[in-house]
Structure formats: C-alpha cells, structure tokens
Image: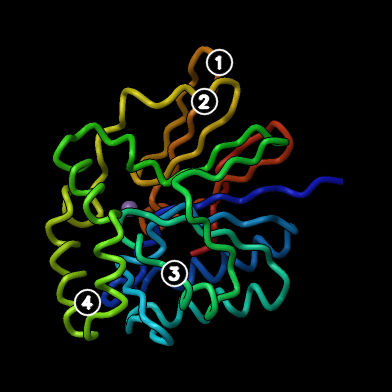
Amino acid sequence: MSFPIFIASDFHFGTGHEDVLQPFLNLLKMAKEWNAKLFLNGDLFNFWIEKKNYIPEGCRRFVEGLKKATEDGLPIFVLKGNRDFLLGETFKKETGVTLIDDDVYVIHEKKLIITHGDQFFDDVGYQRYRKFIRSGVICWLSRIAPKWVSLYVAKRLRNSSKGGNFKSYPLPKNIDDPNDFTMILGHYHQEVIRKTKRSVIIFCPAFDEVAKVLKIDDDNYEFIEVPQ
Ligand SMILES: [Mn+2]
C-alpha cells in the first residue's frame, strides 16, 4: 500500500499575517489522517533569521504546530523559499522537520522534482539579488550580528525583494526540461498545470490565498481544499 505525498507552498506566516495559522494546522491534521508525507515547498515564513535558540517573534506558533506534528509522527520536509532562505539548525531543532538544503528535492521512484522555483524567474536583477543573498555572506552575518541588526537587514531585504509582498510573478517560460519527471513549484502564487512534450509542470497557489494542497497518489495528482 502506498501513501500519498502532500505538497503546499507559500504560507508567508509572520507578524500581521496570522490568519493562515488555522488552515495550516488543519493541513497538518489532514496530512496525518491520510498518512501522507508532507512537503512545504518554500516561503513557509515571511522571513526568518537564524540564531542559536532564537525563533523570530511572528513564527513561534507555526514552529509549535510543526513540532507537535513531527512528534505525532508526521514526516515533514521543508524547502527554503526566497523569503525564508535563512532557515537552518535552530529551525530544524525546534521543529523536528527535515530541512532540504538544495534548491530541488528529487523523488526518483515517483519521478517527482519539488522546488520552490524562484531560480526560474526570468528577471536578471532578481537573479543577481538571489545569488548575493545566498552567497553565504548574509547567512554568516545573520548568525553573528546582534538580533536587531539581523532583523533590520531581513526587513530591508524583504522590502527590496523584487515584486514586493505576496504578488504573483509572471510564470517563467524556460524551465529546465524535467524530462519525464513531474516538477512542482511554488513561488508564482498561481495554480497552473502546464503539460510539456515529455513532462508536467505544476505551479502551486499560495496557501495564504487559496488553502489547497497538491495530493499525489501513484500517478494521480489533484489539488484538494484544506478547511479554513
Ligand atoms: Mn511566496
């Protein structure tokens, strides 16, 4: 008997954006009832700074929910998004989730590629910015700088981040051909299924706008609604 895979993206949880907490907790409950493996495909938080034994103020209740779910035995895999790319050891320790360090997570036996997908965004300025923030300098600064400095920088980066808050980005035209694999992306905040010659590319809506989760069972996939 095989168990489904659940994938949801772009929760953007944080101060002033707490409405998504209850649907998120409902999602965890649903995943558990289905015996699913749950993938959170980037931008779980509106921002995160990584410090030893520190959880950013607005993120605590999400972290507690995750912790309870992993303690109950739900397997949860978290990919980093463009907003919470600093997720690290503290987050892992406080939640018990598996944190994926790479841009993509591949499940060969199911022919699936899971990725936040902002690396495909067709904007040179954004890609330059992305390279810079992921260069390691910011991660290092976040760890060693005083908390207020990190928070200040995180807020500045978030505000200067191309596109501003929670907008949907134009869908990228060129995506590395997944070649027989199904690729699942977040980031673009749109529910779109694109069939190419050899593969399927699925864009997930932002969970804070449309509380839906992609359920993959053998070869079938469908978006199912999560109670608000
Ligand atoms: Mn997002």
Label drawn at residue 178: 2
Does the rendering let one see residue 25? Answer: yes
* Spatial CA span between label 2 and label 1: 8 Å
Residue furthest to the right: 1
N-terminal-most mark, 2 or 3? 3
N-terminal-most mark, 1 or 4? 4
Label drawn at residue 198: 1
Closer mark to the observer between disc 2 and disc 1: 2
**Type of amino acid under label 1:** Arg
| Element on which disc 3 rests | loop
Does the rendering let one see residue 65? Answer: no
Q: Would you say the residues marked 2 and 1 are in contact, meaning their CB atoms lie under 8 Å apart?
A: yes
| Element on which disc 2 rests | loop
Residue nearest the observer in this picture, 188 or 102: 102
* Spatial CA span between label 4 and label 2: 37 Å
**Type of amino acid under label 3:** Gly
Give the residue displayed 28% in from the left and 77% down from the top: 15
| Pointer 4 local density, CA inside 10 Å: few below 14, some 14–19, many at least 20 | many
Label drawn at residue 150: 4
Label drawn at residue 88: 3
Residue 33 pos. (x, y %): 73, 63
Drawn side of residue 124 relative to residue 70, left or right: left
**Type of amino acid under label 2:** Pro
Give the residue displayed 73% in from the left and 71% down from the top: 73
| Element on which disc 1 rests | loop
